[in-house]
Amino acid sequence: MNKRILGIFITLCLLVFSFQAVAFAAETQAKPNIVILATGGTIAGAGVTSTTTVGYTAAVTPVDKLISNVPELTKVANVSGEQVAQIASESMTMDIWLTLAKRVNQLLAQDNVDGIVITHGTDTLEETAYFLDLVVKSDKPVVLVGSMRPGTAMSADGPLNLYRAVILAGTKEAVGKGVMVMLNDTINAGREVTKTITDRVDTFQAPIIGALGVFTGDKPVFYRQSLRKNTTATEFDVTNLTTLPRVDIVYHYAGNAGTMIDAAVHADAKGIVHAGTGDGSIGKAEYPAIENALKKGVVVVRSARVGSGIIARNGEADDDKYGFIASDNLNPQKARILLMLALTKTNDVKEIQRMFWEY
Ligand code: SIN
């Protein structure tokens, strides 16, 4: 090869290389930057065989493996991962919530982060979602995702759920929608969604209200938005919080005489969420224990064990007379979260009732 041909060859190689470098840089820039914060759960779970869908071990697969198991993620986002916890979500703690919320706020304050996906067990996923909905200080998308079958199962739902959660977190339409939950092709609001079935992939529903949107193929389609204040519009701030006030949930049932209310007061609860029957009813035999709790300064919220519907203020109990707070349509586990955060601000029951109407 003479020198001229060699020169042309080298120039062509350099041109091809620089075209490829420019194309790669353009592709990387065009894709959203999504951080996956992993906390464990069934989505990181493993069973003994491919047919093991109960009795598997949750929270074993590390975040790097969760990401590398879905190579398609690199086509839709620049993804990085962090392991915040590795637990089955029934063991979620307030410490982990505070760590998670602070990390989410840190990351979303960075210009090079467009959205966050949190992998989570399904048992308390709705609680973490609502907690974050109230304390995240950014409009950027935050999406919680889990799965009902471990990654080792035939027809595992985790990989597709994760793939779609990452797409959702990088979608412009998801900005300003509050903290969302994505499983089974369905996008729900963190405030409204609840786990309704113990063992099915269509377990996450928002009773009466319905989903925010759905996926059609790889495209999220929104149909509505939650009207309750969330994220940047709330008055709650975890920056300086190292703990949350103790709030217990007390479940009502036929024959209940308030023993658990006494136990909560004895354990120094600052608040009690009463999971009443029907429209948040309190049994006659519970009143002495409730009145004792109120006298000791414990704030009492009336919610219902029913699973959906609004608690009518001054309906099944004289809320004004006793100083109860009606939980609106928050189920007991969500009412507890709002009450914990409310108690970081005030003990005034009128103010706390206002928060329950607003959030
Ligand atoms: C858990 O909540 O960690 C276990 C159950 C699940 O993720 O589905």
Image: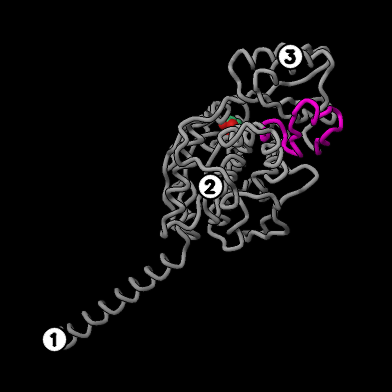
- In this view of the protein, can residue 319 be seen by the observer? yes
Closer to the eye: label 3 or 1: 3
Work out which quarter of the rendered image holds the C terminus and state it.
top right
Q: Quadrant of ligand 1?
A: top right
Q: Which residue is mark 3?
A: 289
Contact (Cβ within 8 Å) of mark 3 with mark 1: no
The figure's colour scheme reads one colour
Q: Is residue 322 magenta?
A: yes
Question: How far separated are the C-alphas under marks 2 and 3?
Answer: 36 Å
Task: Name which of mark 3 and mark 1 comes first in the sequence.
Answer: 1
Task: Report the disc number at residue 2.
Answer: 1
The picture places residue 73, in percent across and down from the top left corner, at 49, 54
Q: Which residue is mark 2?
A: 136
Q: Quadrant of residue 154?
A: top right
Is residue 22 toward the left or the right of residue 182 in the image? left
Relative to residue 154, is residue 214 depicted above or below?
below
Front residue of 93 and 59: 93
